[in-house]
Image (cartoon, helix red, strand yellow):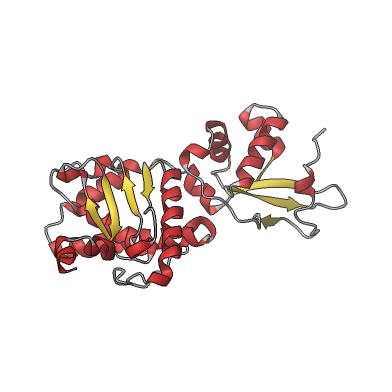
Amino acid sequence: MATSPSTSESTTNTSTEGPISVVPSRSQPAVNAAAVRSVDRELLLCLRSGKPKSIGDLTEQLGVTATAVRQRVERLLEVGLIAREKVVAGRGRPTYHYVLTPAGYRRAGADATELAEAMWAEIVAMTDGDVREQLITAIASRLGRQFAAALRGDADGVAVHDEKKPPCSCQQTDADQDSFQERMQRLTAMLQTKEISASLIEPASQQDGVLPVLDIEACPYPSLTAAAGDRSMCRLEEQMLSEALGEDVHLSSCRMDGDSCCQFSTKSDNESNSPSNSESG
């Protein structure tokens, strides 16, 4: 005899007319590959066909106990990778089926590393420099908008618009320094969830308008920066971070120049520390 759904399941939806897809209303935290256990990924793969499945279906397919399946289901509901459907048939007790959310489909998909590497190699190899730079700028802008959406807490961090936007050229004012520093802090934490070795060097005080510096200890995409002397990825990262933060960001230190790490700072901060500015003062 099938066990009844948990209390949280039984209160999700009280409709009695057919199957209804229910996406959890609570805000979902950012999820990285490491946060999804291998056993949870097995459950995601079971749902990849798109056919809703019950706890019983998943138990049979995975070959584990219903309790184990429920634990995995709760974890995946919590992070927004699956959604629950309540199905009412006649006068019987309602049952619950589970499906992948858009984020779940992305997570259950094949590893896109080889595809990304091939596409990037073709971009870098383009002979028309103007077209190549336009494409890199467009990619950076799209990624930056995704990061910006995630920083705002938009669902899945994919509130991306297709309209063409120029690279960010805004300048930070004194009144906005605190909010900018908070954005830098959130962005650093977000990069860390994506297994990017990021840290934030924050000023000891807010005097003289000194802003924090983003420190990247190791290249996030070593296979995409293998070409000696090619700075395409560096430019992409500058533009992406500028779009995400709403502030012009400059790569002030780079491992390709022999520095110990890559550091990103605001252009205004970089200019305020330049020799010409310091001499003029």
Foreground of the two, 15 or 88: 15
- Residue in the image at 36% along x and 55% along y: 212
Taking the image as shown, residue 205 lies to the left or right of residue 275, namely: right
Taking the image as shown, residue 43 lies to the left or right of residue 236, namely: right
Taking the image as shown, residue 202 lies to the left or right of residue 33, namely: left
Compared with 47, 65 (above or below) is: above
- Residue in the image at 37% along x and 45% along y: 198
Taking the image as shown, residue 179 lies to the left or right of residue 2, namely: left
Does residue 155 appear anywhere in the picture? yes
Foreground of the two, 53 or 264: 264
Image quarter in which the N terminus is found: top right
- Residue in the image at 60% along x and 56% along y: 27
Q: Can you give x and y, in whole percent of width and height, for residue 221 in the image?
A: 29, 43
Q: Can you give x and y, in whole percent of width and height, for residue 4 in the image?
A: 81, 40
Q: Can you give x and y, in whole percent of width and height, for residue 46 in the image?
A: 57, 38
Foreground of the two, 63 or 176: 176
Q: Can you give x and y, in whole percent of width and height, for residue 252 in the image?
A: 23, 54
Looking at this view, name the residue that lies furthest to the right.
91
Does residue 158 appear anywhere in the picture? no
In the picture, residue 115 is in which quadrant?
A: top left
